[in-house]
């Protein structure tokens, strides 16, 4: 990797981290010169990093003015929660019974980690532990494409959870209780009950309403001639 590529990667990671953890809040105008000084690189890699971040949907670049940090719209939040519901519940449904039991035991240890991070008020560690917790459900399905899709959503999860700030901290105890319920449903071997618990959990955490995954059993698609 060349020095320029290394500097661009460092600038990209530093700016993205600032956006995800709330240091650069939505509506903030970022300037190349101040970013370069803060990160310790020249303006060229910062400019390249900003272009990449714009392509990824995190900012809007305004030539000669700076880059405006974007937030997630209400629709984008709902879409994120909906996608996670489908990925996680479908993966758990496809896992065999033995794998679900092994996963449940592993996730009980993960919940203990969440309790520890909450006890010391470490929001960043709590967010990361919850992302790992939910990723485990997708891992259970052993579908690499679904896991790749899940990982592409991880930064949006971080951004949204960090944006809740004190509101998230106030809800952490409830989140842990809901995680315990998910593990209980996982052990019980009822994918439908798990999906319903997950739907309520994501809806409460993201502040949005999620429809049940399965349509009314009486619904039938009529064939077209």
Image: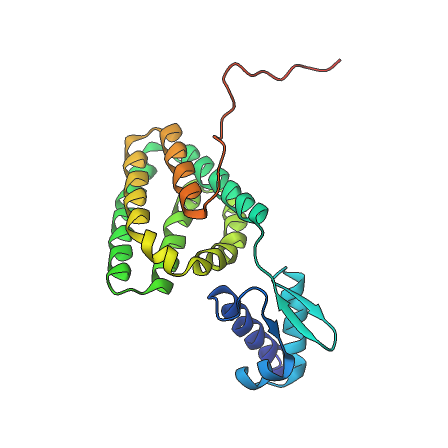
Q: Is residue 164 above or below residue 135?
A: below
Which of the two residues, 78 or 43, is positioned nearer the viewer here?
Answer: 78
| Residue 88 shows in this picture | yes
In this rendering, position of residue 13 left or right of residue 114: right
Q: Position of residue 117 (x, y in %)?
A: 28, 61
Residue 27: percent from left, percent from top:
59, 66
Q: 42 or 170, which is in the foreground? A: 170
Residue 76 x, y percent position in the rendering = 58, 48
| The C terminus, quarter of image | top right
Residue 103 location, x and y as percent? 32, 43
Query: How many numbered marks does the figure carry?
Result: 0
What residue is drawn where x is 34% and y is 58%?
A: 169
In the figure, 77 relative to 59: above or below? above
Residue shown at 50% from the left, 19% from the top: 216
The vertical placement of 180 against 23, above or below, is above
Q: Give the left or right position of residue 195, taking residue 189 as reference.
A: right
């Amino acid at each position: 990797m060349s020095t320029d590529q290394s500097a661009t990667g460092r600038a990209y990671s530093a700016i993205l981290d600032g956006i995800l953890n709330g240091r650069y809040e939505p509506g903030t105008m970022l300037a190349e010169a101040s970013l370069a000084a803060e990160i310790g690189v020249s303006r060229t890699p910062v400019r390249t990093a900003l272009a990449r971040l714009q392509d990824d949907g995190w900012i809007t670049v305004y030539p000669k003015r700076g880059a405006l940090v974007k937030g997630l719209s209400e629709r984008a939040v709902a879409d994120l929660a909906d996608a996670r519901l489908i990925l996680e519940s479908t993966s758990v449904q496809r896992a065999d019974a033995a794998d679900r039991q092994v996963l449940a035991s592993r996730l009980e240890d993960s919940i203990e980690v969440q309790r520890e991070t909450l006890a010391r008020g470490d929001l960043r560690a709590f967010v990361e532990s919850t992302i790992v917790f939910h990723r485990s459900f997708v891992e259970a399905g052993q579908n690499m494409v679904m896991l790749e899709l899940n990982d592409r959503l991880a930064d949006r999860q971080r951004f949204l959870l960090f944006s809740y700030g004190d509101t998230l901290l106030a809800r952490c105890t409830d989140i842990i209780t809901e995680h315990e319920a998910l593990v209980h449903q996982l052990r019980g071997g009822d994918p439908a009950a798990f999906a319903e618990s997950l739907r309520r959990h994501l809806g409460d955490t993201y502040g949005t309403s999620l429809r049940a995954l399965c349509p009314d059993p009486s619904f039938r698609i009529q064939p077209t001639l």
